[in-house]
Image: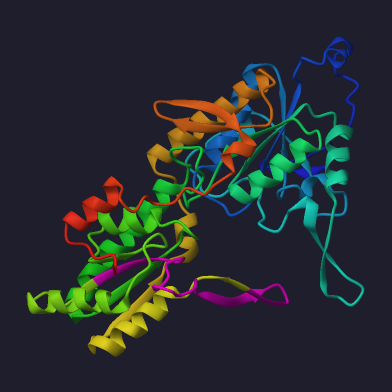
């Protein structure tokens, strides 16, 4: 039982009496489809959910949302399984976040539990998730997530669950799809921030360092840096030399340009350096996460050039807000393509953008490698031709 987006609680029967007996005996008949959202949120999640619900109802199926990742299938966890109808997804295409809730700590193969000494422990609860899926008489699971969530979905598929994946990550680092939804909205947010920083940087004759997300891929930094006319773009794929970064700033000074904008991906590293990590509050304790490179770069620029330098970390701003139109459209296309996979019982697949079409690819294949920025690709060459420094 769970709380529906409309505020109504709906009891979900494990074996509803109203189900047609003939349909129960026909293994090829899809009747009940579940959706979950896992990992970090991204603009476009609700659009995918709406597309799945409407396309499924059009086929005469029932649709259920699993709240809070896989937690909604575990009886001792918050949330539940909620039935979704047309009213529940009305007007959500433009909304950020996810009406189902999400978590990046919901791996059923390593479920976080408290040990006897109150220290965190991991417990394998995948069998419980699989059992609950079958107890609720579900026929398919559409899992919406990034590489971590889709790794879990693939493992559950190996355990026998009929799974179709939908790629979601603002990092755009899934190799099997040309684009992931949420990426272009994150780029738009970062571009807007960089644009606003130009005026204050010029007014105060400062260097402004903007740190953006992306983990080990530089797509957000490269695209937003280009669109926002940054002078320096630092990405994980091209280790930087801080002296060359400072040389670019001094070159601008010599030309009478007394301010500079540096866009740095959170996973960027100096030559022979390591990814910068930071400690953040986590529950009652602390957790180490990637991030903090912006402050490091700003401090080193100030020390070497004497320029007043400020840093700004955009962080979760890039995950929030209304999806741009392209992300809305691609999300709706991904959702309906996932339903077509379910209809064909084409499980163990992820729907991917292969322009101009959406096509299914094996989940295992889609997770083999992360997609990084080609260092000799057109986008990098464009930036270099415009005078952008990559610190190399």
Instruction: Residue at 77% x, 14% y: name it.
Output: 28
Q: Is residue 75 above or below residue 86?
A: below
Q: Quadrant of the N terminus?
A: top right
Q: Looking at the image, which residue sits at the far left?
A: 255
Q: Is residue 327 magenta?
A: no
Q: In the displayed structure, does residue 322 sit left or right of residue 89?
A: left
Quarter of the image for residue 241 reads bottom left
89 on left or right of 179 = right
- Residue name at image x 70 percent, y 59 percent: 105
As drawn, 120 above or below 306: above
Whole-percent x, y for residue 123 in the image:
85, 58
Magenta-drawn segment? 261-287
Residue 263 part of the magenta-drawn span: yes
Which residue is found at the position 66% from the left and 50% from the top? 101
Q: Position of residue 96 (x, y in %)?
A: 51, 48
Point out the residue furthest to the top here.
22
Q: Quadrant of residue 204 in the image?
A: bottom left
* Camera-nearest residue between 269 and 229: 269
- In the foreground, 263 or 182: 263
Q: Is residue 79 visible?
A: no
321 sits left or right of 129 in the view: left
Q: Residue at x 34, y 84 (%)?
A: 300
| Residue lying at the far front of the rendered structure | 272
């Amino acid at each position: 039982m769970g709380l529906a987006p409309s505020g109504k609680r709906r009891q979900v029967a494990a074996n509803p009496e109203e189900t047609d007996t003939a349909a129960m005996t026909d293994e090829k008949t899809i009747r009940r489809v579940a959706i979950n959202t896992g990992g970090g949120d991204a603009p476009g999640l609700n659009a995918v959910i709406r597309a799945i619900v409407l396309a499924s109802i059009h086929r005469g199926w029932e649709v259920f949302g699993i709240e809070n990742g896989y937690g909604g299938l575990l009886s001792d966890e918050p949330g539940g399984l909620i039935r979704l109808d047309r009213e529940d997804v009305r007007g959500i295409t433009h909304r950020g976040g996810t009406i189902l809730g999400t978590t990046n700590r919901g791996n059923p193969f390593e479920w976080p539990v408290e040990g006897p000494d109150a220290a965190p422990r991991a417990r394998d609860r995948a069998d419980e998730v699989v059992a609950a899926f079958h107890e609720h008489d579900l026929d398919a699971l559409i899992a919406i997530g990034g590489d971590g969530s889709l790794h879990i979905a693939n493992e559950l598929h190996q355990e026998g669950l009929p799974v179709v994946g939908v790629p979601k990550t603002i990092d755009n680092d899934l190799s099997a799809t040309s684009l992931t939804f949420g990426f272009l909205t994150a780029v738009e947010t970062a571009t807007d921030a960089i644009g606003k920083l130009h005026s204050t940087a010029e007014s105060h004759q400062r260097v402004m360092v903007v740190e953006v997300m992306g983990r080990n891929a530089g797509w957000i930094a490269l695209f937003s840096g280009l669109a926002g006319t940054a002078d320096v773009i630092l990405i994980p794929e091209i280790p930087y030399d801080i002296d060359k970064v400072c040389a670019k700033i001094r070159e601008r000074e010599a030309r009478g340009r007394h301010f500079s904008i540096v866009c740095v991906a959170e996973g960027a590293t100096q030559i022979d350096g390591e990814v910068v990590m930071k400690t953040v509050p986590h529950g009652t304790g602390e957790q180490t996460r990637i991030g903090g490179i912006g402050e490091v770069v700003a401090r080193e620029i100030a020390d070497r050039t004497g320029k007043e330098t400020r840093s700004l970390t955009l962080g979760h701003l890039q995950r929030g807000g209304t999806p741009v139109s392209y992300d809305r459209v691609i999300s709706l296309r991904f959702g309906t393509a996932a339903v077509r996979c379910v209809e064909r019982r084409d499980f163990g697949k992820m729907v991917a953008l292969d322009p101009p079409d959406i096509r299914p690819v094996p989940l295992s294949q889609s997770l083999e490698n992360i997609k990084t920025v080609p260092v000799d690709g057109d986008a990098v060459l464009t930036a270099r031709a415009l005078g952008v420094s990559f610190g190399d």
